[in-house]
Image (cartoon, coloured by chain):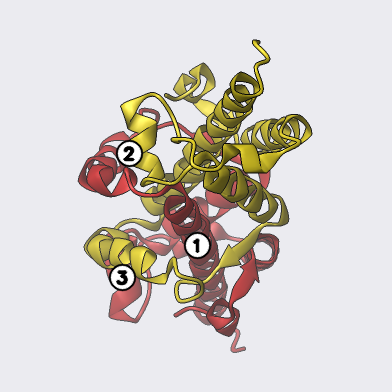
Chain colours: A red, B yellow
Amino acid sequence: MQPADTKLGRSCLMTALRRYSAAVRDMEQTVLLPSLLREVAAADDADQAQEGGGKDLYEHYLMLKALRNTAESGLVVSDDSKDLGHHHQSLSTTLEPLLESDPEVLFHFHMHGIFSIMNSLANKSQSVTSKYLEIIGVTN
Amino acid sequence: MQPADTKLGRSCLMTALRRYSAAVRDMEQTVLLPSLLREVAAADDADQAQEGGGKDLYEHYLMLKALRNTAESGLVVSDDSKDLGHHHQSLSTTLEPLLESDPEVLFHFHMHGIFSIMNSLANKSQSVTSKYLEIIGVTN
């Protein structure tokens, strides 16, 4: 699922952010009636459906826009805020022993994590756009 | 160990990056003879010594400068490159089941991770600067 450039030694976080922003902009310009995405299953392939946690495409659409705003602004949501709290908390608790490892490893781990997730979110945005076109009967 | 602003609902990644950059700049301008940091234990408090994995202050100094460059450029080191590979790999393998969770949770997890680690690296840079001043006999 990762694009070819992640296989290179180094990849740029700004490129990943630009790609994600562009994919969301394209999605926003295409999806003129977002409500048509309600109750549409997230994706055909099992992987994405599992990742999506049973959300419909409309929820994906909202999430992709919200995360794009967060990514562009660089605002970090704290551990406790929103209802992400307990998921995030359990993630952090499980990781606690690992998080005491070398700060260099940890730094690269999170940089790589942000990079991968932005690429994955860009792909999801493109997939919402394609699915919408399919719903309204426009073939790519 | 986390500064007060992480306790707020939202914090800015750019502020954390600026703070880290400033701390490294200050360290570079103060530490005129980096070799004086060789074979000096990383920190007095047990936490930091454990995190540092037995590196001396000179190695910390080099690491802090290198990571600052990476953070400023936004370049992401891939899983396989450098000798970080196997640490990173083991981190990723342990996390694999968690990484299949909601992309929203994962996104915030990594954003928060980068934010925390940059604050921690800023603190480490300040601590190297203080230790250097102590070594050359200048008291703050």
The picture places residue A130, in percent across and down from the top left corner, at 55, 78
Which residue is the site of mark 2?
B50
Would residue B48 appear left or right of B90 to someone viewing this image?
A: right
Q: CA distance from mark 2 to mark 1?
A: 24 Å
Label 3: which secondary element? helix
Question: In which quadrant is the N terminus of chain B drawn?
Answer: top left
Q: Chain of mark 2?
A: B
Q: Which mark is residue A112?
A: 1
A78 and B76: which one is in front? B76
Q: Nearer the viewer, mark 2 or mark 1?
A: 2
Q: Are marks 1 and 3 on the same chain?
A: yes
**Amino acid tagged 3:** Ala
Q: Which residue is painted at 27% across and 60% down in the image?
A: B95
The reply to whether dot 2 and dot 1 touch (C-beta < 8 Å) is no
The picture places residue A41, in percent across and down from the top left corner, at 34, 69
Q: CA distance from mark 1 to mark 3?
A: 23 Å
Picture quadrant of residue A56: bottom left
Q: Which residue is painted at 49% across and 51% down in the image?
A: A107
Q: Chain of mark 1?
A: A
Q: Residue furthest bottom?
A: A139
**Amino acid tagged 1:** His
- Looking at marks 1 and 3 on the same chain, the residue that comes earlier in the sequence is marked by 3
* Mark 2 surroundings within 10 Å by alpha-carbon count, few (fewer than 14), some (14 through 19), many (20 or more): some
Which residue is the site of mark 3?
A49
